[in-house]
């Protein structure tokens, strides 16, 4: 079991990561001391006064005692100094208190709490989100820590497929690491490219729905109908297909509007969060279309979602095929 410190303060604006650390600490605490050895203060009960009382209360529990305090970003400096400072100045033995602060722009853990935790021999750590434009570089650093080597295009593709949530990016990197043979000692790991990331990171339903949307953008009625029928035969549900189609059509509409405004194709391709080949193909398809047509296609997808939920008496596949044929024509 790990050696626990008397106090912890975990703060920052990466709320997902803070939640993960809270859950991990609680699991470790319960495995060492049992559920009875963990006390949780949250909501209205999580005040500096309540934390001080918890620290000073004697218990008959065996083993180490853990106190988890949520929501300390709402605390005020003067309350921390007045109520908690005396209790943390000399924390009781065999006790660990962990403070969690899910911060936002103007809501921060009090500076006094930082100082008190450090003075008690505890640990203060920040979980901060990475700025969107820095995520590809961050993903490459995390990949290296897992024994992977992502090139720039692969990192961009990963962010494009998964989004900007760091926890999801880490999960996808871990899945990639499981599928790669470790490099021999002393050798660099093999580079992972954008195509491999695209294959591994995007779900099969997502990729196939993109294919369907791309056929709509490219005005390929036969390809649209063929792809749709194949998807349905494989068991794909209409709500999921409509969701991913709408996502792809929104990207296509944005590209069309940027091209119409005079932006260069090269600049548009570079800004798309997808592999270079996919970006080149999408821009080429959009070039042959126009914003009004793509906007109408999005409206048709929205109406199709309404109709598929009982808005018309026709069967789901019938209304879908009619709508798709209209969009691709």
Image: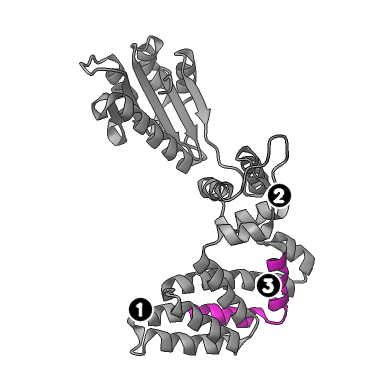
Indicate the position of residue 23 as horizontal and vertical percent values. 38, 36
Q: Classify mark 1: residues with Cα within 10 Å, few (<14), some (14-19) or many (20+).
A: few
Q: Is residue 78 magenta?
A: no
Q: Which mark is residue 282?
A: 3
Residue at image location 69% in from the left, 35% down from the top: 185
Instruction: Measure how far apart labels 1 and 2 are at the Cα level.
Output: 46 Å
Residue at image location 35% in from the left, 13% down from the top: 87
- The part of the image, by quadrant, that contains residue 43 is top left
Mark 1 or 3, nearer chain start: 3
Q: Is residue 284 magenta?
A: yes
Contact (CB < 8 A) between labels 1 and 3? no
Indicate the position of residue 121 as horizontal and vertical percent values. 47, 14
Q: Which mark is residue 191?
A: 2
Pick whichever, 296 or 265, lies toward us: 265
Q: In this picture, is 102 found above or below 122?
A: below
Q: What secondary structure do most residues of the magenta stretch adopt?
A: helix
Q: Which residue is mark 1?
A: 309
Q: In this picture, is 165 found above or below 127?
A: below
Residue interval drawn in magenta = 277-302
């Amino acid at each position: 079991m790990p050696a626990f410190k008397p106090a912890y303060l975990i703060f920052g604006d990466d709320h997902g990561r803070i939640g993960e650390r809270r859950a991990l600490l609680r699991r470790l605490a319960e495995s060492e001391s049992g559920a009875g050895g963990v006390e949780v203060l949250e909501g209205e009960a999580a005040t500096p006064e309540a934390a001080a009382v918890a620290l000073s209360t004697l218990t008959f529990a065996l083993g180490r005692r853990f106190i988890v305090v949520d929501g300390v970003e709402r605390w005020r400096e003067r309350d921390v100094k007045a109520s908690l400072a005396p209790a943390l100045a000399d924390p009781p033995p065999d006790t660990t208190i962990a403070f969690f602060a899910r911060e936002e722009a103007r809501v921060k853990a009090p500076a006094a709490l930082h100082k008190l935790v450090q003075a008690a021999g505890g640990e203060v750590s920040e979980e901060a989100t990475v700025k969107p434009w820095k995520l590809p570089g961050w993903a490459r650093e995390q990949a290296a820590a897992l024994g992977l080597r992502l090139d720039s295009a692969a990192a961009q593709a990963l962010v494009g497929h998964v989004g900007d949530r760091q926890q999801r990016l880490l999960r996808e990197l871990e899945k990639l690491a499981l599928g790669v043979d470790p490099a021999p000692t002393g050798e660099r790991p093999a580079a992972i490219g954008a195509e491999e990331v695209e294959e591994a990171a995007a779900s099969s339903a997502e990729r196939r729905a993109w294919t369907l949307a791309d056929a709509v953008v490219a005005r390929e009625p036969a390809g649209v109908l063929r792809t749709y029928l194949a998807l349905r035969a494989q068991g794909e549900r209409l709500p999921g297909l409509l969701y991913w189609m709408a996502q792809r059509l929104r990207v296509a509409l944005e590209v069309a509007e940027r091209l119409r405004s005079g932006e260069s194709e090269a600049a548009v391709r570079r800004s798309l969060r997808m592999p270079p080949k996919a970006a080149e193909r999408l821009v080429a398809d959009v070039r042959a279309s126009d914003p009004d047509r793509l906007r109408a296609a999005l409206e048709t997808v929205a109406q199709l979602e309404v109709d598929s939920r009982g808005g018309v008496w026709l069967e789901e596949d019938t209304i879908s095929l009619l709508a798709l044929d209209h969009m691709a024509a």
